[in-house]
Image: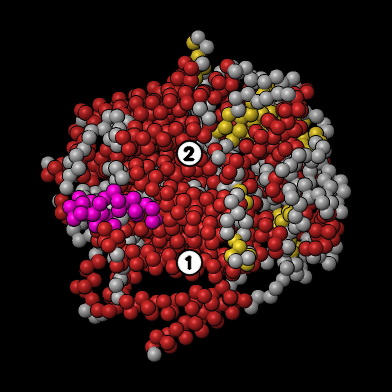
Amino acid sequence: MILQQVVSGIALGSIYALIAVGFVVIYKATKVINFAQGDLMMIGAYVCYTLITQAHLGFFTAMAISTIATGILGFLLERFTLRPLLGSPLFTVVIATLAISILLRSTATMIWGANELHFPMPLGEQTLSVADINFSSAHVFITAAAFLIVLVFSLFFRFTKLGTALRAVARNQIGSVLSGVSVERVFSISWFLSAGVGAIAGMLIAPLTFLKIDMGNLGLLAIPAAILGGFESLPGAIVGGLILGISENLSGLFLPLSVKRIFPWIVLVLVLTIRPEGIFGEHKKRKL
Amino acid sequence: MSIKSGNSKLYLREDREKRSDWIFFILVLPVIFVLPLFLGSYSTYLCNLVGIYIIIAVGLNILTGYTGQVSLGHAAFVACGAYASALLVTRLHLSFLIAMPLAGVITSVAGLITAIPALRLKGLYLAIATMAFSFIVGEAIVALSDLTGGVGGMFVPNIVVFGYKISTDRQFFYLLFPLVILLCLAAKAVGDHSRIGRAFFAIRDSEPAAEAFGVSLTQYKILAFVLSSFYAGVAGSLLAHYLGMIGPDNFTLMHSIQYIVMVVVGGMGSVAGSIMGAVFISLLPEGIRIVKDYLPEFLRQEQELHMVIYALVMLGFMIFEPSGMYGRWLRIKYYMKRFPFNKKKARIFKRREIKYSSAME
Amino acid sequence: MKVLMKTTASFALILILVLSSLAAGAEVGVSKDKILVGTHMALTGPAAFAGKGLLEGMKVYFQFVNEEQGGIHGRKIELIAEDDGYKPTRAVAAVKKLMDRDEIFAIIEALGGPTTKVAMPIAQKRKIPYLWPSTATLAIVHPVRRYIFGYYTQFDRICVGLTDLAVKKLNAKKIAVFYADQEAGHNVRDAVIERLKKYNMETLGNVGVKMTDVDYSGVVAKLKTSGVDTIIIATHIPTTVAFLKECRRQNYNPTCLQDPQSTDPMMFKLAKDPAVTNGLIGATYMLPVDSDAEPVKKWREHMAKYSKMPPGNYSLMAYCVTEMFCDALKQVGKDLTREALIDKLETWKNYDNGLSGPVSYGPEDHEGSEGFFVVKAKDNKWELMFDKRVNVTEKMDRK
């Protein structure tokens, strides 16, 4: 029983982690929480759906095209709405991402309508039972994808030139400008990457939740996971997601429903008060 | 998204010219008080709603505009006030005139409790913590269903003042607007002439500097939360009794966002700006409805168009007018005043004197 | 001096503007060749699925009446729909706009619990008929208000019927409720718990879910291990389908019964695979949309003729209610007033248009329908389980 809950918790945690990666990639470089992340995810899933049903593409081709398309959308959003805001207070930028979220949501409703849609499962549905514990293919897929994406991104940040540039900007913007990195381009690229990751997350989660406009609300649920993991750390996103997923599921066994609901947010407030830098974050001294 | 985020040019100081203020009052006050006599119930309802939103926005401005603390959970404070007042009237049978300020005080206590974890946090983290707070309050409303009626909400009786029942929109208007004006003037007094206001501005512009000048960060940040949530509590109480029915749907994240947008669109740091923002954002749907009649047929049918325009207006203000409507108003005023010698003076208000790109490349 | 002049000038301007807007006369929505009818519902946001369906059903019937019957006693009906986005503040604004600006005759078929709850008292105060809102809110019919009429069977009645069905006919031993954390869901949960007391039974491990929940594997595992054999579902369609899918995945096949809100053909579109929904028992206010009954056929024809929307449960509901409204108007006759309409409705006994069951009203009874159909999902179709409607006519214990 408890073991099954842990397994389900891992699946839930991987979903959180998958979404949280998108938050982390943008936050790392630009120090902004993108409240439209969940909606980019939704757009990615809808584009993929349209490609499958209208253009009759195979799932994986559609997935690849949709990932790139959503990435480009993220890039354009950065270029035309957030680039002009460079130098404004953080606050203005956050409100702007909220506005983007509303914009994406209502535009999507105009295009695809408010009804939920059926989204195909990429590899068919199978359930594996080991000693009374069920692993479903969708969950295994999501967990694998979350780990894979974090691995790929970690390698990318570690070993490629672009990744190094991203890390440099994350650490010290003026310093990286002085060493010839274009901060603006790094910002654009991080939006591209994050929107792309969001699209992948959307396409993997849509078979579970169906395709719906307010899929973006899921994005908010991943914020506690990202914060728990330190908000700047990719492995942190996975660990944070898993901790939250498992503990949320276990709390569902023993605690009343309302406590289970706010559990991630209570964890978040506690983390922020006790150790705002999260598990994997670095402690930063306050500078004058 | 910046190299340095402290840009105090964006925050506005109140225009200190007394004369223009008085003209404003002489012109606007009588109009406000005669207005409902000529308006139908629907228009008066909109005015009342705007009045309540003005209280919330002006209160939020104390926290965000004056002190620079972001709150994405202000709807939760409004909820506290609404439920507190409703319960005081229905359960303890208090008079509305006692219940409303008391609801404000109770909400202030909620603000105090929120302020304690918020003291350690800044910027985005604070925004997220306040958002978490609003989710927790929302869930608490559902969980305490014996008191609050849970997801179904609860009915709230009409306001009774000295045995006189306030049941029409017009009566409510005359109860509400003196209060709105009083609260706005109080907020303006705090911002303009008080030691507290100066301490708030100091914290907003630079916390270390404020601390160095002997401003107690703890004390004044808590005070900002308390004042701001008091306003929200009073507004919540009025909203509850006016609508006659409250439920969790009145206090969602979307509402919190709307309140903060009012403050930002109006112009952070000024009472007049918050008022403009509240009026503009709450009447925007009406404006869109009017504009819609002139659009081509296929767009007119589109219900979602309203949200698209709302989002575009928000984005437009962020990008082109970050100092808000009040900032634009000040600029126009200076332009007119110095005409035709306006060129030089107008530059004071240029948004960013040193653009990031030109400085860096 | 200048200030004074400015003040006077602006005053005069405002006065002129305001007075000109007041010039319109005080009609009650009925003119020589037109009847104005209003409604408010969510046409945007998460509840828009229901709102758009309802609106389409109303439009289709009114269009049919206007074009094929030449209106009612020579008057064409014009429908004004306001979008309230499921928000109480906007619902109040919508109702006041309908009453003040558009000056409608009556409001019919509004949607939603929180929205109708704030709108209804205003209509009652202004003495404007507020008929048959589509909501699970008991407050609409209890206590009785002269200008407010309910139609859809109240949730406590449906729950009594479903619980009796589960215990008596389906041999339920361990019952759990799977509900959405919203008003409708909570109502179902409480009503089922209440009814089970009669059989000395208790619910076991009820589960509340939110729209944002993604994963139900933990929930299903918990239900499975606690040996629940019957689940009463009160959630939205996507949640229900996701839950059923998870049950099948874990090879867990309890008897599932659901409340009317998601008994819709939409469910099969989402599930695709009939194995997921097969055996699901649903309560529904109307006959199944693909029923062979004459009135349902007529509705399908009208939908095909006047609308582009695929026929669904919500449009059928609204169609049925709109037909009731038009019939009432016809019965009132040429001298149409609000009072006459209310008086007429209060004399209705066993009115039946064949889409749902009979309905009766009285001065002390505005509740409306008291029964529901039971349907079972089979190969992506709803099939009637019993030919007759299940009626729950006993007196309900309502606080």
Residue A77 x, y percent position in the rendering: 35, 48
Instruction: Give the image quarter of residue C159.
Output: top right
Instruction: Name the mark on residue B179.
Output: 1
Q: Are marks 1 and 2 on the same chain?
A: no
Residue C91 x, y percent position in the rendering: 60, 55
Label 2 secondary element: helix
Give the class, few, some or many, for how many residues have Cα within 10 Å of label 1's Cα (few <14, many ≥20). Answer: some
Which of these two is toward me, A9 or B129? B129
Residue C293 x, y percent position in the rendering: 81, 38
Give the class, few, some or many, for how many residues have Cα within 10 Å of label 2's Cα (few <14, many ≥20). Answer: many
Residue extending furthest top?
A131
Q: Is B227 colored magenta in this rendering?
A: yes
Question: Given this view, does label 1 or label 2 mark the residue nearer the observer?
Answer: 1
Instruction: Name the mark on residue A128.
Output: none
Residue A52 x, y percent position in the rendering: 49, 33
Which of these two is toward me, A203 or B319? B319
Q: Which residue is mark 2?
A: A215
Label 1 secondary element: helix
Instruction: Look at label 1 and name its amino acid.
Output: Leu
Magenta region, residue range: B200-228
Instruction: Look at label 2 and name its amino acid.
Output: Met
Q: Is C171 colored magenta in this rendering?
A: no
Residue shown at the point (45%, 61%) measured from the top left: B55
* Residue A99 in sight here: yes
Residue extending furthest bottom?
C1
Placement of C55 over or under B196, stated as above or below: above
Residue shown at the point (54%, 75%) measured from the top left: B35
Q: In the figure, is residue C120 to the left or right of C335?
A: left
